[in-house]
Image (tube, helix red, strand yellow):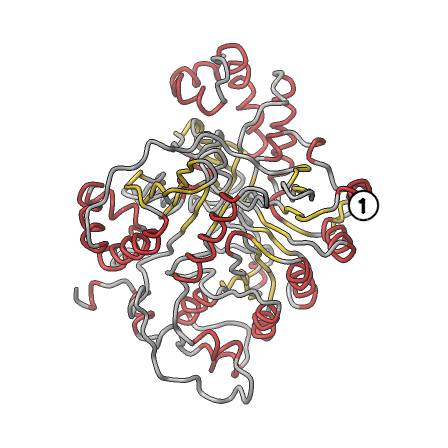
Amino acid sequence: MSETELSKVEGIKEASRQLRGSIAESLREGGDQFSDDDCQLIKFHGSYQQDDRDVRKEGKVYSFMVRSRIPGGKLSAAQFLAELDICDKYANGTLRVTDRQSFQLHGVVKGDLRETIRGINEAKLSTVSACGDVCRNVMCCPAPINGNPVRKQLQELCDKLADHVRPKSTAYYEIWLKDGDQSEKVHEALVEEPLYGNTYLPRKFKIAVTLPEDNCIDIYANDLGFLAVVEGEQIVGYNVLVGGSMGMTPAKKDTFPAVSHRLTYVTPDQVIAITEAIIKVQRDFGNRQDRKLARMKYLIANWGLEKFKAKVEEYFGGPLPEPHPTDVTDVDDHLGWHDQGDGKLFLGINIENGRIKDEGELRIKTCLRTLLAKYPVNVRLTALQSVLLCDLDPAWKADIEATMKEHGMALAEDLTLARRYSISCPALPTCGLAVTEAERVMPSIMDDIEAVMDANGLSGERIAIHMTGCPNGCARPYSQDIGLVGKARNKYTLYLGGNTLGRRIAFIYQDMVPEGEIGARLSPLFKYFKSDRQAGESFGDFCDRVGLDALTAAGQS
């Protein structure tokens, strides 16, 4: 492949000296932004350069999003409190739980970027490879059910995978963490990157592991997934899923969202080897000319699954069997009180759209500070942007609930299932790709949807509603019961026919739906669902069964 065929970003990576570029020099020189080339490289260090789009007409005001890398969403109370301290000191005073079980800070200015990243590392967390063309945060069902050895095996695998796929470059340490005179030029010697090579991957790569009965991390939306096959109290192997990805570009007709394909079955001792083989196939054959076609789903679509599997077998070093019959059967949001199996409890707390902040009578940030200072327990983050407080003594239950109510926070039983299973991306004003709102309007849209669900006798129904401010699909809207995808200012494409299990891509029901009409457009469909559903049928499965024409007719009646 000649250099002229490569995308610009490929050239930036190749010339970067393993992701160094001129980041260190730019930090020393000051200013409020990085060069275009360095903006591509800082992603690998866990940050995106952004500007406040609410004030863009008056001129760009630059700041940075900083994302932590938290495998399986596992962290201590001290680490959680440290992130809260950092958000107050260096960011915009809010902390966001992402839908990949990590934290994001927004509003960090360039002059505070190094101290922000150092602070996260001092809390024994990291931002390395939280973004960029590498394996992102590895996801895992976070439920701390300590009496279940299967859960322990699953989370140990998550940690092992996360450690194995971390880039080996020392650039991160040298730029952000090295003590001493920062005027020194960063170390020029390169190290071997056995997994990633000189130019890393063609695009981002996402990995997740989970259980069939609890697909809370949405395994089918990942490039690579490991679905546990359990016998007794032992994981005997994993079904390997490949090629999931939610992003698309509507103007580019050969792009599309996709759920994973079931590729093969491996034993636990083969997981690392199959992971390496799959990543290396994507590394060596993924599209490096057009970044919009660079995710692994396009390689699989172009080759076909049979050819892709044959190439993986070549890299793996032997034949691979067919998948085990085991598949995803259910999903749990883990909200409310649960027995851990060791005499302790864990509590799942809904954080609407993941934004931890104090606003008016709802003081989420102060509440979590208060609880974690008083009860310094372990914490887990979920893929539905919620928080689990773990290892709680049952005697603390009344005090914890009282503290939550005092700070305006709802208990799980006070929320509809639709609200609990809803998530959104940040969108405006920070995301440079957003075409319209998501997080800031999602609560009011959910108010409307809840009202029409209640009017149709469906307020107790579990319907997953995911919303994004653009077609890149960061909140996984294309595989849920209802997907809302930003198309133009205050207008959305309405997708129907996925489901909470995330195993099927939804279809477009209506395009260019005004924000204020979403609830009204859904109301006749809920009425149709209520009258014509089959026993136990979910809303998404109903929409998929009856099809677009029948739904359109119902919507016009």
In the picture, measured across the screen, residue 307 lies left or right of residue 84, that is left
**Count of marks, rendered view:** 1
Mark 1 burial class by Cα count in 10 Å: few <14, some 14-19, many 20+: some
Front residue (pair 239, 476)? 239
Front residue (pair 103, 158)? 158
Q: Secondary structure at mark 1?
A: helix
The quarter of the picture where the N terminus appears is bottom left
Compared with 61, 474 (above or below) is above
Compared with 404, 328 (above or below) is above
At 55% from the left edge and 46% from the top edge, which residue is drawn?
A: 142
The quadrant where residue 88 appears: bottom right
Front residue (pair 292, 502)? 502
Residue 12: x %, y % from top left: 33, 70
At 41% from the left edge and 66% from the top edge, which residue is drawn?
A: 40
Residue 371: x %, y % from top left: 76, 52
Task: Write down the residue under mark 1.
Answer: 403
> Which residue type carries mark 1?
Thr
At 54% from the left edge and 28% from the top edge, which residue is drawn?
A: 463
Compared with 228, 90 (above or below) is below
Single out the residue that lies furthest toward the front.
232
Single out the residue that lies furthest toward the top.
531
Residue 37: x %, y % from top left: 39, 71
Residue 462: x %, y % from top left: 56, 27
